[in-house]
Amino acid sequence: MKILIKNIEFSKVLDLNNLISYQESQVISRTISQTLSVNVTLFSLDKGEGISTHVTPGDAMVQILDGTAEITIDNNIFTVKAGETIIMPANVPHGLEARERFKMLLTVIKH
């Protein structure tokens, strides 16, 4: 049987915030699942860090777990806080910056 979920415990209640930590001046990632059609990754970004503008071949759902992110989608800037979610459409330029440190769960569904 192929394992589709990794780097996370099975059959246990988990707090996603506790599965990734902040590190000074770093972007940290922890891959939860990576297949041809779906990627699920936890990220933590320290204040001032970011992911530069790029495009992806799939729709990307960002769920903010802690802190606040500034997310740019096609030159529109959104402030997204803990408990909020935003979708970045496939093939549309997007990027993000940590005005304060934040953690997110990123799910990318490829077409």
Image (cartoon, rainbow, N blue to C red):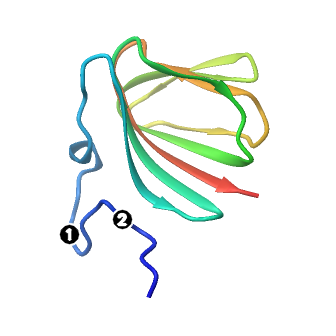
The amino acid type found where label 1 is placed reads: Lys
Q: Quadrant of residue 29?
A: top left
* Residue displayed at 46% across by 72% down: 4
Which quarter of the figure is the C terminus placed in? bottom right
The amino acid type found where label 2 is placed reads: Lys
The residues bearing labels 2 and 1 have C-alpha atoms spaced at a distance of 14 Å
Residue named by callout 1: 12
Residue 23 drawn at (x, y percent): 24, 25
Residue 25 drawn at (x, y percent): 31, 16
* Residue displayed at 20% across by 69% down: 12
Q: In this view, does 11 lie above or below 28?
A: below
Q: Residue 6 carries which label?
A: 2
Q: In which quarter of the image is residue 88?
A: top right
* Residue displayed at 24% across by 48% down: 19
Q: Indicate which label's residue lies in the foreground, 2 or 1.
A: 2
Q: Pick whichever, 50 or 72, lies toward us.
A: 50
Q: Is residue 80 above or below residue 108?
A: above
**Is 32 on the left-hand or right-hand side of 36?**
left
CB-based contact (under 8 Å), mark 2 and mark 1: no
Q: Earlier in the sequence, mark 2 or mark 1?
A: 2
* Residue displayed at 64% across by 64% down: 36
Q: Which mark is residue 95?
A: none
